[in-house]
Amino acid sequence: MSIHSSLKVSSGSSGQRNVWTRTERIAALKKQGRWNDGDKVTGLRKVRTRFKAKAKPKKADAAPAAGAAPAAKAAAAAPAAKAAPAKK
């Protein structure tokens, strides 16, 4: 007999964790400058739990290399020509 699909356990974490371990909280407090050596490890301050990094904006190629510019224009024009075949 097989296990029902709703009862299966996923192999990895399905989403963002909302609880940090004590060492993760202390590291975050040190980074923010809110932790001093010798402070109590019980009753720690609250810490935001965001692991996801912000996506970096993609840079537009403002000035490609001088030798690559003609080749890039030709390469850009080639797919456009292929995309719209001439009708007979």
Image (cartoon, rainbow, N blue to C red):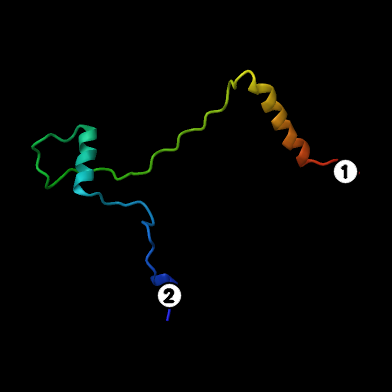
Location of mark 1 (residue): 87
Direction from residue 40 to residue 81 in the image, left or right:
right
Foreground residue among 48 and 74: 74
Q: Quadrant of the N terminus?
A: bottom left
Q: Quadrant of residue 56?
A: top left
Q: Position of residue 8 (x, y in %)?
A: 39, 69
Residue shown at 88% from the left, 43% from the top: 87
Of residues 83 and 41, the one drawn nearer to the viewer in this rendering? 83
Q: CA distance from mark 2 to mark 1?
A: 55 Å
> Mark 2 or mark 1, which has the lower sequence index?
2
Which residue is at a point 35% across and 51% down the rendered structure image?
A: 16
- View extreme (front): residue: 67
Work out which residue is located at the far bottom of the displayed protein and give it. 1
Give percent across and percent down for residue 74.
Answer: 72, 28
Residue extending furthest toward the right: 88
Number of numbered discs visible in the structure rendering = 2
Q: Amino acid at mark 1?
A: Lys
Q: Residue at x 13, y 34 (%)?
A: 36
In the rendered image, the residue lying farthest to the top is 66
Residue 81 image point, x, y percent: 78, 36
Name the secondary structure under disc 2.
loop
Q: Residue placed at 49% from the left, 33% from the top?
A: 57
Label 1 CA crowd tier, 10 Å (few <14, some 14–19, many 20+): few
Mark 2, Cα crowd under 10 Å, few <14 / some 14-19 / many 20+, is few
Residue 43, relative to residue 30: is it above or below? below
Name which residue type carries label 2. Answer: His
Disc 2: which residue: 4
